[in-house]
Image (tube, rainbow, N blue to C red):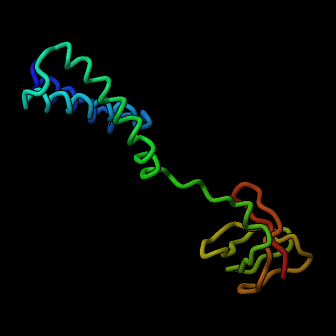
């Protein structure tokens, strides 16, 4: 095969990697194809058999050497554990009657919270998060 076909195929495979959620597999086969294309252009690998043997070897070598590093670099952080809010300080932003739902601030973010105390919570009063149910916190006075 001509060297420019390998280069073109490699570029196409790398673009496909960007367009699909493949988990960083296709990119390394694109790098293998680019490697074969560059070595073909330089005249190092000239025969079709040598090119077709070099392609999987180079692709797998790139895959084994660099996939873990690429995945760690682009790894998304785990979602925050909202259950860790239990026992955390909450500050009502408005008056919350007993059993009613209002807005509280927890760790700099506003949340909906239900007052489980027998008395109303006033704005700015310190409270403790007792439980978390979806996006609704349950609070009581400190």
Query: Image point 80% across, 72% down: which residue?
Result: 87
Q: How many marks?
A: 0
Quarter of the picture holding the N terminus:
top left
Query: Image point 50% across, 52% down: which residue?
Result: 76
74 vs 113, left or right, is left
Of residues 117 and 39, the one drawn nearer to the viewer in this rendering: 39
Extreme right residue here? 118
140 vs 76, left or right, is right
- In the rendering, at what x and y percent does residue 104 appear? 69, 74
Quarter of the picture holding the C terminus:
bottom right
- In the rendering, at what x and y percent does residue 132 appear? 77, 60
Vertical order, 82 against 91 (above or below): above
- In the rendering, at what x and y percent does residue 54 appear? 25, 23
Of residues 4 and 65, the one drawn nearer to the viewer in this rendering: 65
Kindly indicate the quadrant of the structure image that contains residue 22.
Answer: top left
28 vs 128, left or right, is left
Extreme front residue here? 44
Kindly indicate the quadrant of the structure image that contains residue 52.
Answer: top left
Query: Image point 11% across, 27% down: which residue?
Result: 44
Kindly indicate the quadrant of the structure image that contains residue 125.
Answer: bottom right
- In the rendering, at what x and y percent does residue 137 appear? 75, 65
Query: Image point 20% across, 32% down: which residue?
Result: 34
């Amino acid at each position: 095969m001509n060297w420019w076909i390998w280069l073109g195929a490699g570029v196409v495979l790398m673009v496909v990697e960007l367009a699909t959620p493949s988990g960083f597999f296709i990119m390394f086969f694109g790098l293998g194809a680019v490697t074969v294309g560059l070595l073909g252009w330089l005249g190092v690998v000239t025969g079709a058999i040598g090119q077709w043997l070099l392609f999987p070897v180079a692709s797998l070598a790139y895959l084994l050497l660099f996939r873990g590093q690429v995945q760690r670099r682009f790894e998304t952080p785990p979602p925050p554990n909202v259950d860790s809010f239990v026992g955390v300080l909450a500050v009502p932003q408005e008056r919350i009657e007993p059993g009613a739902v209002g807005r509280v601030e927890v760790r700099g973010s506003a949340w909906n919270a239900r007052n489980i105390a027998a008395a109303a919570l006033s704005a700015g009063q310190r409270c403790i998060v007792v439980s978390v149910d979806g996006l609704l916190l349950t609070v009581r006075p400190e």
